[in-house]
Amino acid sequence: MSALELTIAELGQAYRKGDASPVEVTEAALQRIAAIDSRLNSFVTITAELARQQAKQAQDELARGQDRGPLHGVPVAVKDLYATKGIRTTAHSRVLLNWIPDEDCTAVAKLTQAGTVMLGKLAMHEFAYGGPGPDSAFPPARNPWNTECVTGGSSSGSGAALAARLCFGSLGSDTGGSIRNPANLCGITGIKPSYGLVSRHGVVPLSWSLDHCGPMARTVEDCAILLQAIAGHDPLDPASAEVPIPDYRGALQASVRGLRLGVPRSWFEEGEGTEAEILQAFEDALRVLRDAGAVTVEIDGTVFMEARAANTTILVCEAYSWHEETLRARPQDYGSSVRDRLREGALLSAADYIQAQRARAAITAQVRSVLRDVDAIVSPAGPRVASTFKDFDPELTYKTPSYTNVFNLTGLPAMSVPCGFSATGLPIGLQIAGRPFDEPTVLRLGHMYQQATDWHTRAPTLD
Amino acid sequence: MTDDLTLDDVKRAAERAGWSLSEEDLSKLLKGGLRGRRMAALARKYATQDTEPAGVFSARRSDDQP
């Protein structure tokens, strides 16, 4: 088996046993990127020289016994809205095409401190908004399970690169589902942590009060390892929370027996609904969770359905306020998809924004009330499998239900883990959400599920 | 509230914002604007008299404690 098939946890063991080395693995990753990424477009910038230098440094440090922990020497890549010192950071837009930051954002600085090897910057939806734009600065990332299909977004390159075994871990960002959607559609694992757990300092914003940074990887255990490295208070992020950081990886070992899982069935079974094979995969996943001792409880889905309106209103207003001046001065530098969406913010009022924030307070109180009776909320991660680029309709994204954005509105931790495949061979995801800052329970449930299933181990055929 | 947005309103908003838009762009913006206002109107349903927004900016509240 190629070392690129290993998880972060396994790679760490291989390094310490002498079965693999950071230099060899980094070189293998760079070769694979060179060989297949022209079909996926997952990277917008490859930092080969930096990667080789960091890999050599990690190898030398490990040889000297200077062990920085489970990420030491692990090749990663980050969404191209994380500021990286001396490396172009574009947010996939011509607006920032020539921006070379003077410093790393906090999350990347923490990854570097943990000894990771930076392979490069990953494609995304322009400014993390809109769909895969045909006229953005770079081509859209393609789904490794079927390159005619979209990856989901906005952390599109992260989903594609992880599924294609081009990197071992990634950082995405999530304002309405942008970590969980590509995790879902590309068959990988991604967690949007609680609001304030991971610093947003140095990350190009979309909507300040909804933006979350978080890890994406192939397994829950790898996400726990990455989260451990990047979580924690940062005085440079005004929304950063001062909370204790538990041992996320250690928490995976606890039993899920007796945990109560709320199932808001009316949310995803009524109205536009969810594709039948996704519902089937979800029911199968519930069975696995019950077999492990968790208890499923039906809960009212009404409040979850209503969250989207407030989330969208807040997002549109906040995004417009960040882009207002540039939209006026350099409209031609935006792709048409994101430009059209951003302009809609000019048509909403201050009262619309405040009313949406008031609605958010009410919805948050209701969802937290639900979480007094259950330990977690489970649902499908999305209503549809990946569409083809040909069939992708930006208008449809407004009409299709979203199962992710309620957890941005409420700031709660939520994760997508692979739970099956469609008849057409496309991944299906399970969403697990929890109480504020209770990432350990969310991760524990996901890890138990991955111990009992093998969906997360499957890889697309690209060679 | 939601259907009171007209093409003239959109033109005025575009002027205020300093944009020079084609008729096609204005029509597209009108459609998006109407959709946005419908969303905002839906959100208002949840903004009850006794809710105020400051709490949403605090990630940790006393009722989060286990």
Image: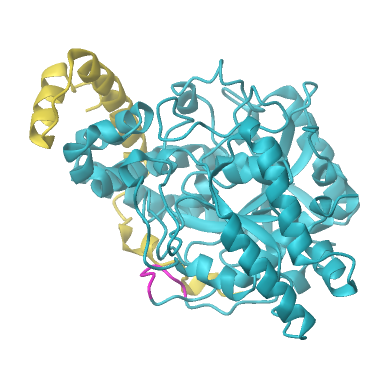
Chain colours: A cyan, B yellow
Q: For this view, does A232 lie left or right of residue B46?
A: right
* Residue A198 falls inside the magenta stretch: no
| Residue drawn where x is 66% and y is 26% of the image | A147
Instruction: State the image quarter where residue A293 is shown.
Output: bottom right
Residue A454: % across, % down: 87, 45
Residue A421: % across, % down: 79, 31
Q: For this view, does A326 lie left or right of residue A131?
A: left
| Residue drawn where x is 26% and y is 37% of the image | A345
Q: For this view, does A237 lie left or right of residue B5?
A: right
Q: Is residue B64 above or below residue A44?
A: below
Q: For the N terminus of chain B, which image quadrant?
A: top left
Q: For this view, does A357 lie left or right of residue A210?
A: left
* Residue A239 falls inside the magenta stretch: yes
Residue A398 visible somewhere in the drawing: yes
Q: Main secondary structure of the magenta part?
A: loop
Q: Where does the magenta region start and end?
A: A236-241
